[in-house]
Image: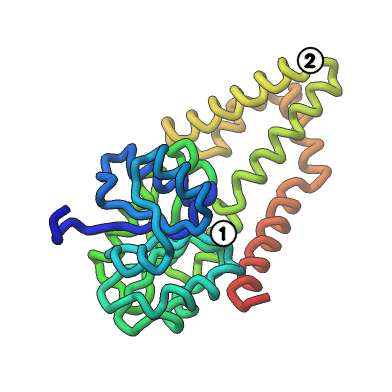
């Protein structure tokens, strides 16, 4: 391998780490440009066999790579940075996918001149439909930010936001898939309650979700307009929506997302 080939290391080979790895491979990233940091021998062998990528220790990966994507739980970030910090050098890029961890937290634990980008991904990245929001740290160039965007674009859409908005993004899109799955689960249970076989209810609800999402994305029409198109005066949909309003579903969603935002802030403060 030539010395000018830039390498990207992924530290943390859990679900999201492997999702990013597989997305980069599918997007055309050469395996000789990729490293994975993984201590468990069995997991390392599994990844090497599946992707043909070199799996090494975290420190070795940090030493060799130009870009280091850190995909670990927030509570593990401090220990990992203590481990790899001495191996890092100015000019490298650290891309953090850990919820609630600020760029300032990372910058305080790595050498001066190491660029940091904070990312809030979500699980639809597993099917290349992720939504990632990226925020630059204080030593981050346009080139560094573009590299972070390129990484995340391999598994979905990417937007740039100021870091002060990251807690809100965590509440909306980071945790968002769980809200959607909760609604789907509730609708399926309702279908069973109304006398449908569970498999039938599941097929009806899931395809309705997929079709509705596609309408939102492809028509660009405001959701209020799309909802009104389904809602005939005095009809079945109007009756159902009235019940949702009586039970204050809008207020419940707002309260839920405020709670998620507040928890993200707590994580950033080390709580």
User: Residue 10 at x, y = what percent?
Assistant: 40, 57
Label 1: which secondary element: helix
At horizontal 55% and vertical 28% (from top left) the residue drawn is 210
Q: Quadrant of residue 263?
A: bottom right
User: Residue 100 at x, y = what percent?
Assistant: 56, 68
At horizontal 82% and vertical 44% (from top left) the residue drawn is 247
If you read the primary sequence from the N terminus, does the residue marked by circle 2 or circle 1 appear first? Answer: 1
In depth, the one of 269 and 12 nearer the eye is: 12
Q: Quadrant of residue 24?
A: top left
Vertically, is 226 above or below 28?
A: above
On-image quarter of the C terminus: bottom right
At horizontal 82% and vertical 21% (from top left) the residue drawn is 192
Disc number for residue 225:
none
In depth, the one of 83 and 191 nearer the eye is: 83
Determine whether, in the image, residue 251 is placed left or right of residue 168.
right
Vertically, is 82 above or below 258?
A: below
Q: Which residue is mark 1?
A: 170
Vertically, is 195 above or below 79?
A: above
Residue 146 in sight in this render? yes
Disc number for residue 197:
2
Label 2: which secondary element: loop
Determine whether, in the image, residue 150 is placed left or right of residue 177.
left
Determine whether, in the image, residue 16 is placed left or right of residue 65.
right
In depth, the one of 236 and 71 nearer the eye is: 71
User: Residue 125 at x, y = what percent?
Assistant: 47, 43
Vertically, is 229 above or below 20?
A: above
In depth, the one of 185 and 69 nearer the eye is: 69
Q: Quadrant of residue 57?
A: bottom left
Residue 161 in sight in this render? no
User: Residue 82 at x, y = what percent?
Assistant: 48, 78
């Amino acid at each position: 391998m030539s010395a000018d080939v830039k390498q990207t290391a992924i530290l943390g080979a859990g679900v999201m780490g492997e999702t990013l790895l597989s997305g980069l491979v599918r997007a055309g990233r050469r395996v000789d440009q990729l490293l994975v940091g993984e201590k468990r021998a069995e997991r390392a062998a599994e990844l090497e066999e599946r992707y043909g990528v070199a799996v090494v220790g975290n420190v070795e990966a940090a030493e060799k790579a130009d870009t280091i994507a850190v995909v670990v739980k927030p509570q593990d970030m401090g220990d990992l940075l203590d481990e790899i910090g001495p191996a890092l050098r100015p000019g490298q890029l650290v891309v953090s996918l850990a919820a609630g961890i600020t760029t300032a937290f990372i910058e305080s634990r790595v050498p001066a001149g190491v660029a940091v980008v904070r990312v809030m991904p979500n699980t639809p990245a597993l099917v290349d439909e992720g939504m990632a929001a990226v925020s630059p740290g204080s030593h981050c160039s346009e080139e560094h930010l573009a590299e972070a965007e390129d990484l995340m674009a391999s598994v979905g859409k990417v937007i740039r936001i100021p870091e002060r908005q990251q807690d809100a993004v965590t509440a909306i899109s980071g945790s968002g898939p769980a809200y959607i799955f909760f609604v789907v689960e509730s609708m399926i249970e309702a279908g069973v309650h109304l006398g449908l076989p569970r498999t039938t209810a599941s097929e009806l609800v899931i395809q309705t979700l997929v079709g509705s999402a596609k309408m939102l994305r492809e028509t660009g029409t405001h959701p209020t307009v799309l909802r009104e198109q389904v809602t005939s005066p005095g009809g079945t949909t109007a009756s159902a929506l009235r019940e949702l309003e009586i039970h204050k579903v809008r207020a419940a969603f707002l309260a839920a997302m405020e709670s998620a935002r507040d928890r993200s802030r707590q994580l950033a403060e080390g709580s």
